[in-house]
Amino acid sequence: MATSELASDAQPPAPVAARSNTSALLILFGLLAAIVAALVVGLSAAQALVLLGIPDPGPLTTYGLPAVRAVAEIATAVTVGFLFFATFLVPPQEDGVLDVGGYRAVRTAGIAATVWAVASALMVPLTLSDTSGSPLGEAIRPENLFRALGQVETALAWAWTTVLALIAALLIRLAVRWSWTPFLLLLSLVALMPVALTGHSSSGGAHDMATNSLILHLVAASVWTGGLFALLVHALRGGAHTDLAARRFSVVAGLCFAVMAISGVINAAVRMSVSDLTSTTYGRILLAKIVALIVLGLFGWAQRRRALPALEADPTSRSALARFTLVEGFVLAATMGLAVGLGRTPPPPPTSVPTIQEVELGYQLDVPPSFSSLFFGQWRFDLIFGTLALVLAVGYAIGLWTLRKRGDSWPVGRSIAWFSGCFVLFVATCSGVGLYSPAMFSVHMGAHMALSMLAPVLLALGGAMTLALRALKPAGRGAAPGPREWLLWFLHCPPSRFFTHPLVASIMFVGGFYALYLGGIFTTFADSHTAHVLMNLHFLISGYIFYWVVIGVDPSPRDVQPVTKLAMVFGSLPFHAFFGVTLMSMGTVMAESYYRGLALPWNYDLFADQKVGGSIAWSAGEIPLVLVMLSLLVQWSRSDRRTARRVDRAAERDHDADLAAYNAMFAELARRDHEER
């Protein structure tokens, strides 16, 4: 069925020579990255072994590990980039089936995901061999492999990556419709995370900042590198919509360059000083990577100045685009090899021994929490959620500016609600609240309530999706779908309908409390920075979906009746209150060993702190409840007024025909009753 559907509107398949040439080009990029990584490690491997005190595992591991990792990194970028290309850079056919360019990109991504899974599987024994200093032949023996797998975090991360990449490869093989590609892209980005959350950035002082910056860096690098390879292959194959893909990718590449530059500077700044750039091997490799990034920026600027105008003037002329993109692709592949070599090189030793708090939290807490320290005295920008708050605020402001430039109006109350929600998100993650949240349960619960109860209410009242639908230009009949069409698809896709079902939204919103805290998840992962990021993400998303259904002014995938909305609010209150009471009455302290290990002198009574957290959970639902009820009353009142105006207009058009018919019915009933008597 997939083949017949695709063949109806598809272009003729590319010649075998073109397919083999593009495949050879991708293989060449992978080999280049592997060779550069191996060469870089050859310069620093001996130093790394001496500093770590690990025996030499042999040349097969020493040089094989960076080479295999470089192949895995290139395969990762190709998987992510080609899926991104099929999702956003080229349009599907009118019936939703991928066009030829998108179909080829998805199939290439499937092959790359298979290579990614194989390379990740090879990284498991290579990592164990490297960590233990034993030859690869010893590490790969089953009794050694499975016994050591759970003890080496990086090897376990590669094992998880193998599973996720293999699942992605299998699902990609089934995809023939565009609606699959956004979810496959999301899965491929998730598969990036296990390895991104290990290594240099996940340990030592400021590891929270280093880990968050590395996540942003890797996502931007994968989209940029893989997207560039996809654009190059598409141009060499003579694919349709190359001019559109190039214009869209130019914007994406600029954003990725900015994210990579900023996150790279932050990641380097938390582990070394400026003087280390020329005095250490790590610094010199980093300096080479910086130079490569600058060169890539210059190539991007030149391509925007020359290749894109030439392509817009003549969409069939792809020589300039292919030439610039090919050279840029080689530089990107070499840069990825440098990045792999950098990850294998030990950074300069810290100038001071990190404290227990710096090891566990990433920073030091010197004063007890107070109103001043929580909201004014101490701030630490959260690269993920702080950036998210700023992006949401700026994006909304651009939408408002677009409407105002057109002369359209927008309710002031919605703007106030949205910017207030962004402010709450920013304060809950970047102020002292976010700083003390991983260290004290009471502050953590306060941040939890702000992220799940207060910020989502305000964001739902902001009507951002409605604003986007009004501000974004429609693609037009026969044109390629754009952001407005993607947003409309999101509002009506099956996953949106599933998660906005009143029962599902309520279970996610309320059930998360019980699963996380009473189910033991929080106690198990309290010392994990990754777990705290995922918890904050869960709080924000589950709260937004719940309040989107209950009071959201945006269009919803489901038409929920007001009575159902009211039932959702009052139905969740008893469970929320019981959760808070349960926390206050617990006989054990959650994550006690973790909190004791932090040795905070002002947080010695963990029972009392947990009871404070329970009381916050018990009482925090009151303010959102008031906002929800006021919003529902306003919405119902406005709905009644709209209905009344609609009835009045209809009466004016037909001279109260409905009222006349209604009175005639009663007159007829009265006449019949009189005759019967």
Image (tube, helix red, strand yellow):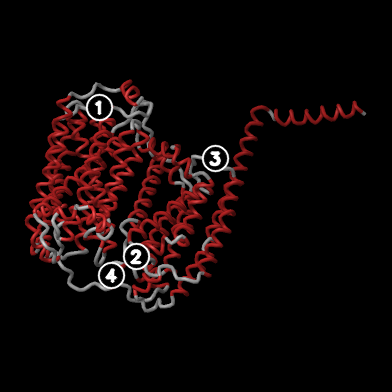
Q: What amino acid is labelled 4 in the image?
A: Glu
Disc 1: CA contacts within 10 A as few (<14), some (14-19) or many (>=20): some
Q: Are marks 2 and 1 in contact (CB under 8 Å)?
A: no
Front-most of 643 and 265? 265
Disc 2 from disc 4: Cα separation: 12 Å
Residue under the point 33% across and 20% down: 8
Q: Which mark is residue 559?
A: 3
Q: Is residue 95 left or right of residue 242?
A: right
Please state which amino acid type lies under the numbered disc 1.
Ala
Nearer-N-terminus badge (2/3): 2
Query: What's the CA distance linking mark 2 and mark 1?
Result: 50 Å
Q: Residue 304's image quarter?
A: top left
Q: Nearer the viewer, mark 2 or mark 4?
A: 2
Q: CA distance from mark 2 to mark 3?
A: 42 Å
Foreground label between 1 and 4:
4
Image quadrant assignment for residue 386: bottom left
Type of amino acid under label 2: Asp
Q: Which residue is mark 2?
A: 527
**As drawn, 145 above or below 561:** below
Which quarter of the image is occupied by the C terminus?
top right
Q: In the rendered view, does 57 fall on the left or right side of 571? A: left
- Residue topped by disc 1: 240
Residue for badge 4:
358
Q: Earlier in the sequence, mark 2 or mark 1?
A: 1
Horizontal side, residue 525 vs residue 446: left or right: left
Identify whether 317 is placed above or below 410: above
Assess whether mark 4 and mark 2 are in contact (beta carbons under 8 angstroms): no
